[in-house]
Amino acid sequence: MKNLITKLENEERLNQEEANALWDLDLFTLGKYAHKKRTKLHGKKVYFNINRHINPTNICADTCKFCAFSAHRKNPNPYLMTHEEIMKIVNETVKRETKEVHIVSAHNKDTTWQWYLEIFKMIKEKYPNLHVKAMTAAEIDFLHRRFKMSYEEVIEKMLEYGVDSMPGGGAEIFDEEVRKKICHGKVSSENWLKIHKLWHEKSKQSNATMLFGHIEERHHRIDHMLRLRDLQDQTGGFNAFIPLVWQRDNSFIQTDKIMDSEEILKTIAISRLVLDNIKNIKAYWATMTLNLAMVAQEFGANDLDGTIEKESIQSAGGAKSAKGTSLKTFIDMIKTSNLIPVERDSLYNELKTY
């Protein structure tokens, strides 16, 4: 343990054994070193953006046990938007000075690849300066399986039609045995990483996520982080890591495990200490509440995500995020925490300090 503390003091890279040993440290020791690293990188700044989430369909060919969003599980209200309906949402949100649309769909086998991809071309033709974050690795893998398109072909179409960056969804937990139990048939861990590597090789950026608090163990989270760290060493393409707290309502996963605030904050702090090559750690308020996301800014996180406007995936599992949050709420909570609110774009360029 003494050697671990020394490495934390000296900000040296941790190996797998040392990373797993972090769980034995108390929360405030972890917070001390994570906050030191966060402050060195970002000072007192807390980042957020003005964005709009759009989920064009909830009809899904895959049956992930953790998911309450899919209409093939416990969601009784299937829907499929037309391109015109999506564009109406985009038109309305642009009027409110939204800088990013974040578009993620379920894996609907009754659509076409054109339905998935051509909407991006429509958006960019009308709003060339609006950032389009879209197509998780899971969606790309679905198009590959459904329409016999290679990963490279899907990515080329994404670039052609104007996708600016990729979200990090579909990563869940990389451990293959856990993955087999919670999302068998979905994109594999190996292919999730491969797809993001291909995207990064096009000089494009993406996020990385980790779904935790279900049946995984702590060492699975460390393994997940280290696989991301290894890819980041190769490509440098991840601009943020987002630990997503699993939402248990309407889920098919049976577990007595309770994810308390201490465990969430420990996971945030450890991610800051292990992922020494990913600059931003996001405390995604939609999965942990805005209050806890603000506390997480003292435990290694430096970002809250965005205003969202409408959120469908996490709220289907019980999160209180369906209607997003206001810009004023973000600014007020950050300032009253003696931190500095900074509006950013999707690639972490600073737009405005409040």
Image (tube, rainbow, N blue to C red):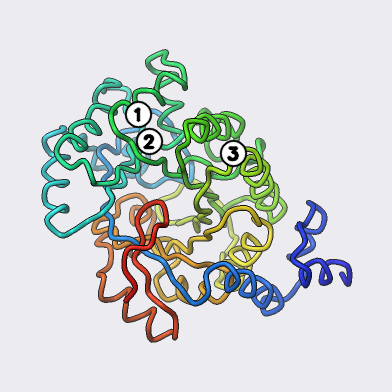
Measured in 3D between alpha carbons, the distance from the residue under mark 3 to the one under mark 2, in whole angstroms, is 19 Å
Tell me which amino acid carries mark 1.
Met
In the rendered image, which residue does mark 2 sit on?
A: 135
Q: Which mark is residue 235?
A: 3
Secondary structure of the residue carrying numbered label 2: loop
Residue displayed at 45% across by 33% down: 138
User: Quick one: label 3, few (<14), some, or many (20+) residues within 10 Å?
Assistant: some
Q: Position of residue 89 (x, y in %)?
A: 15, 47
Q: Position of residue 349 (x, y in %)?
A: 39, 57
Residue displayed at 76% across by 72% down: 25
In the rendered image, which residue does mark 1 sit on?
A: 158
Residue displayed at 31% across by 38% down: 71
Measured in 3D between alpha carbons, the distance from the residue under mark 2 to the one under mark 1, in whole angstroms, is 8 Å
Tell me which amino acid carries mark 3.
Thr
Q: Which dot, 3 or 2, sits closer to the camera?
A: 3
Residue displayed at 49% across by 67% down: 302
